[in-house]
Image (tube, rainbow, N blue to C red):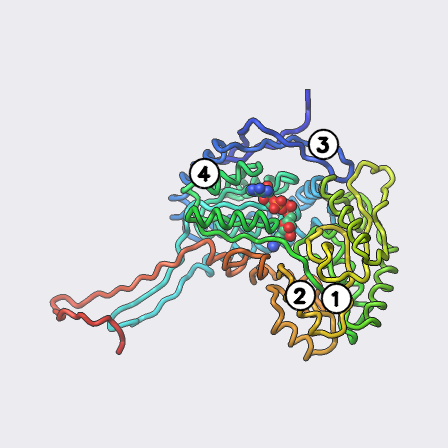
Amino acid sequence: MSTLPVIQHLIHGDLVDGGSRTQPVYNPATGQVQKTLLLADTATVEQAIASAQSAYPAWRATPPLKRARVMSKLKNLLEENAAGICALVTAEHGKVLADAMGELQRGIENVEYASYAPELLKGEHSKNAGPGIDSWSEFQPLGVTAGITPFNFPVMVPLWMWPMAVVCGNTFILKPSERDPSSALLVAQLALQAGLPPGVLNVVHGDKEAVDALLADKRVHAVSFVGSTPIAESIYATGCANGKRVQALGGAKNHAVVMPDADITNAVTALMGAAYGSCGERCMAIPLVVAVGDATADAVVAGLKVEIAKMRVGPGTHARSDMGPLVTKAHRDKVKAYVDQGVQEGTTLVVDGRNAVVQGYEEGYFLGPCLFDNVKPGMVIYQEEIFGPVLGVVRVKTLQEAMDLIDAHEYGNGTCIFTRDGEAARYFTDNILVGMVGVNVPLPVPVAYHSFGGWKRSLFGDLGAYGPDAVRFYTKRKTISQRWPSAGVREGVAFSFPSNR
Ligand code: NAD
């Protein structure tokens, strides 16, 4: 009989069973199964929704300042428990501990922003909008809301969602990735410890069945999704068809342009982290470099080759490791197959990481860094999101050619330009069809008090994640016009449309 720990759902403040199906959770560095995850069935999801609905009236009526204080306490608890949370991230996702710490810190900053809720929810007021009429807009919560999150930021992406949802007065059901669910569950338990009442935040584990149940249920008013584009698109369509507000953030293929005048040494250093950090499993990773001019391309490729040779691939728990394993064996094999395909497509494989072996971790899902030169638009490895440690260099002649390539790509999540030319940088940031743009900043992930969102097929919906957009997403505006006529003053009937004419 299996003695593996079982990961349960968190419903109404308690860890509970639910659903008869289970799934193993692996340690990607060793290839060993370490836990068993319960997969929620529809009845379990409905139980979580009922809990969230029952908690909603009292939570909605709780003053925003009191809701915000829970976030302040949670921030402290997250800092105190950082080592334990990051150990879970590394054990299930595989990323190196320092990277997990960075992810957690970004998540904590979202909790910090959520603690400003009273200020964010103040609304707008106009005196004398008409004669003796005062008008104001307030931002009311939606009710029960839900979030579905990807494997690659198991602790940060949930924190993009539910802290803002709950400080705005909603209750929330989180469905974390089934591949690495433990850190999000621990954070939810810490939120209860911080004072979040039972039912305000529930966590259900599961797969399509759980997601479908959330999308079908009329009691769920809004759904936030982050994951791959095909699933994002389908969740957006189904959620909208079912009358819900939906934001669905999808995949990416981010290009970095390197101009001939760029500081190549610094650009190469920046590209290393952006391409190979977290094994390339980031939606803001840079998998493509567009080098303007052959001399630039030659210098970038030569610089990358030197830096890659210094990289240490190993388990995320080792302080010496720069890059851990990929998340699953299936994903590692898929990424490897993309590298094979790149070779078949006629690119130049400058660095081949396909045979990487980590001593003592032979069953781990490791792949060494790979570098392609002469990648061309139209090739599969140019077009598709690989989500692995694979960087391709594309050679172009002009900045405009580079920008045309980026604009023609189906994704528009992030991009960046390396240059010393302010005019080129300004032209690029003004015109490029991408949602998040860096100038000599390889990973332009907005801070918690801005909002995160790509363009084109990287985001379905109108509002991005966290920051000011999240206040709008998790609330509905109500505008009230009010007057108090003096007693006894009579007014005639007016058939013309009221205005300040
Ligand atoms: P994924 O789409 O496989 O899964 C995301 C979530 O959807 C998981 O919770 C999963 O259980 C659920 N899911 C999977 N298949 C489903 C189905 N058929 N029906 C309903 N739900 C389903 O994504 P992933 O592999 O976990 O994450 C990687 C992807 O996420 C990459 O494409 C990456 O670019 C993207 N991502 C995007 C952003 C962004 O902000 N744009 C951020 C992080 C990750």
Mark 1 lies on residue: 290
Disc 1 vs disc 2: Cβ atoms closer than 8 Å?
A: yes
At label 1, the amino acid type is Val
At label 4, the amino acid type is Ile
Crowd class of label 2 (few under 14; some 14 to 19; many from 20; radius 10 Å): many
Q: Position of residue 301 (x, y in %)?
A: 84, 63
Mark 4 lies on residue: 49
Q: Residue at x 66, y 65 (%)?
A: 406
Among the two numbered marks 1 and 3 on one chain, the one whose residue lies closer to the N terminus: 3
Crowd class of label 4 (few under 14; some 14 to 19; many from 20; radius 10 Å): many
Disc 4 vs disc 1: Cβ atoms closer than 8 Å?
A: no
C-alpha gap between disc 1 and disc 3: 40 Å
Q: Nearer the viewer, residue 373 or 484?
A: 373
Question: Ligand 1: does it lie within 8 Å of the C-beta at label 1?
Answer: no
C-alpha gap between disc 2 and disc 4: 42 Å
Element under disc 4: helix
Q: Which of labels 1 and 3 is toward the front?
A: 1
Tell whether 493 sits left or right of 8: left
Disc 3 vs disc 2: Cβ atoms closer than 8 Å?
A: no
Element under disc 3: strand
- Residue 455 seen in render: yes
Element under disc 1: strand
Mark 2 lies on residue: 406
In the rendered view, tell whether residue 335 sits above or below residue 294: above
Q: Residue at x 73, y 61 (%)?
A: 288
